[in-house]
Image (cartoon, rainbow, N blue to C red):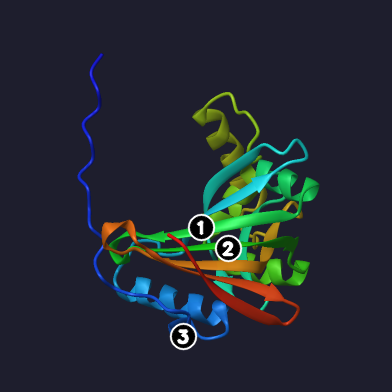
Amino acid sequence: MTNSPRPERIEYGERSLDADQLGDDPIKAFGDWFAEAVEAGIPEANAMCLCTSGKGGSPDGRIVLLKTFDSRGFLFYTNYESEKARHLSESPQGALVFWWQSQRRQIRIRGVVEKVPAGESDEYFATRPEDSRMGAWASLQSEEVESRQALLARLEEVRERFESVDVPRPLNWGGYVLRPSEMEFWQGRDSRLHDRIKFRRRGDVWEASRLMP
């Protein structure tokens, strides 16, 4: 039996992190880090791992795209009949993980997940490219499909249905917002002695503490 080669060990540098650098609002601090990631040219800096679990308690994770964030929390869009949506209907708790390799930074977020108002989903859906809007109608997300050709046939049916008309939002497609109760900022450092600052929401106030690496 042959062992796989070990990946190269990488030292993470000496960029430091203290709670004072992040301020007292972790959502604003997220915005600062996110802007730095975008400025650094990280591809799809808004890609995040969304973790959910259903009533059986078995966890699951997948990469989705953050579409926006505000004082409420972090917004993403999906099919309301997908597996992740079924999980969230059974257990409306979720976790997000952002990882920006070149900056050796990670942000972990936990909180309650709820649907955004229908009007907000309508507004966002209208901004999507037409092909993406049609794809939302064609895909029964997470359901089995016989072949790629069968999926494309469904898409063609949708094209014919909405020929010469504006594509509306399907009622089974829309947004969620994760309202954070915990946010952790991780800065990689040499010797694996990383800096970790965790915020916990206490009512309307965020409390910060340093964690061991």
Residue position for label 3: 20
134 in relation to 202, above or below: above
Identify the residue at horizontal 34%, vertical 63% (top origin).
Answer: 188
- Amino acid type shown at disc 3: Asp
Circle 1/circle 2 CB separation < 8 Å: yes
Residue position for label 2: 109
Viewer-nearest residue: 140 or 187: 187
Does residue 118 appear in the picture of this structure?
yes
* Local crowd size for mark 2, using a 10 Å CA cut-off: few (<14), some (14–19), many (≥20): many
**Helix, strand or loop for disc 3:** helix
Residue position for label 1: 97
**Helix, strand or loop for disc 1:** strand
201 in relation to 151, above or below: below
Left or right of residue 22: residue 15: left
Distance between the Cα atoms at labels 3 and 1?
Answer: 22 Å
Identify the residue at horizontal 56%, vertical 34% (top origin).
Answer: 151
**Helix, strand or loop for disc 2:** strand
> Residue 100 occupies which quadrant of the picture?
bottom left
- Badge 3 or badge 2: first in the primary sequence: 3
Q: Give percent across and percent down for residue 126.
A: 62, 68
Circle 3/circle 1 CB separation < 8 Å: no
Distance between the Cα atoms at labels 3 and 2?
Answer: 19 Å
Closer to viewer: mark 3 or mark 2: 3
- Badge 3 or badge 1: first in the primary sequence: 3
Q: Give percent across and percent down for residue 33.
A: 42, 75
